[in-house]
Image (cartoon, helix red, strand yellow):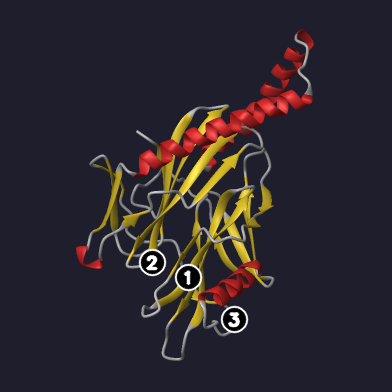
Amino acid sequence: MIEVRLVFVRATGLMMALALMTAGVCAAEPPAKQEEKSDDLVRTESKAATERAVEEIGKWKFHFEDEKLGTIVAEKESALRWAWTDNGRAYGNLFVLSAQDRPVAIVEFFTWYSPIQGAYFQCTSLTNSPMSAKRSGQEIWRPTKNNVVMQDVPDAPTPAKTPAARLVQMRRLAEAFQVEVDDKRATEITARQLRLMSRPVHRYGKAEGTVLDGALFSFAVSSDPGAILVLEVVSSGDGPRWQYGFARVWSYGARASYDGKRVWEIKEVNPRADMMASFYLNALP
């Protein structure tokens, strides 16, 4: 996703110059009218992108290499819709894939309208179990592992008894994380702080299972997720405990701290290099 966005910044100077030339020839519309037109355009394009994404996920089939691990089910509706309108127009939809009541992958479909046009997909594995993704019968992604390392949350409270109370705990734990990415869309690298979206992207768990409760939280720029926090209550011999991990959803380097201490760091990758990687991005056929 990030690699495509780089085109934007490089085109900004040209776009501004063209805008100034146009302003000298044509009378400008009132600001209110321009804003109304812009809002209508965003709504129309966002709706079209969502409809395309919902249609697209229906073309994909997922399965584990080991069939004994169960069936992978993709959500029919997006768990998160996002828009990128800071210096262009792109709209995306995030879908969660699950098996045995636990998320195993995240798939996003996004469409660029300006200054480039095109539709893309990106995938992130959340499991070490090899799987395959096929689109209309053609294999398009085959991850062999994930990029999420689960570990205990430091000094976490005892998990609450009810789902509602645990959700309150989850939000407080998520708020203790600070996440930033190396934003390279400009000529200089900028460490951009991501914003926690307080509502979970996905909630899961099973009272009699290994994972009693869990949620995926998005850390985002505007509404566009730049990292996904996995928070879970897992059963153990010493009783239930909190664990966390981070999933990559951008190709840039990123890092996270918990109560001021570094707990996660990843380097920049080429997202199109390997369809067997845990994180993969490419244009839709």
Give the CA distance from mark 1 to mark 2. 8 Å
From the image, tell me which residue sits under label 3: 156
Where in the figure is residue 42, as x and y percent of width and height?
Answer: 60, 32
Q: Secondary structure at mark 2?
A: strand
The correct choice, above or below, for 128 with respect to 223 in the image is below
- Earlier in the chain: of badge 1 and badge 2, it is 2
- Asked if the residue under mark 2 is in contact with the one under mark 1, i.e. CB atoms within 8 Å, the reply is yes
From the image, tell me which residue sits under label 2: 102
**In the rendered image, which quarter is residue 67 located in?**
bottom left
Residue 131: image tag: none
Quadrant in the picture for the C terminus? top left
Side of 59 where 48 appears, left or right:
right
Where in the figure is residue 137, as x and y percent of width and height?
Answer: 23, 41
From the image, tell me which residue sits under label 1: 214
- Asked if the residue under mark 3 is in contact with the one under mark 2, i.e. CB atoms within 8 Å, the reply is no
Where in the figure is residue 8, as x and y percent of width and height?
Answer: 61, 32
The correct choice, above or below, for 136 with respect to 226 in the image is above
The correct choice, above or below, for 47 with respect to 34 in the image is below
What's the amino acid at mark 3? Ala
- Earlier in the chain: of badge 2 and badge 3, it is 2
Q: Secondary structure at mark 1?
A: strand
Where in the figure is residue 255, as x and y percent of width and height?
Answer: 60, 60
Label 2 neighbour load within 10 Å: few <14, some 14-19, many 20+: many
Q: Residue at x 66, y 25 (%)?
A: 37
What's the amino acid at mark 2? Arg
Q: Residue at x 70, y 17 (%)?
A: 18
What's the amino acid at mark 1? Gly
Q: Residue at x 77, y 16 (%)?
A: 28
Q: Secondary structure at mark 3?
A: loop
Label 1 neighbour load within 10 Å: few <14, some 14-19, many 20+: many
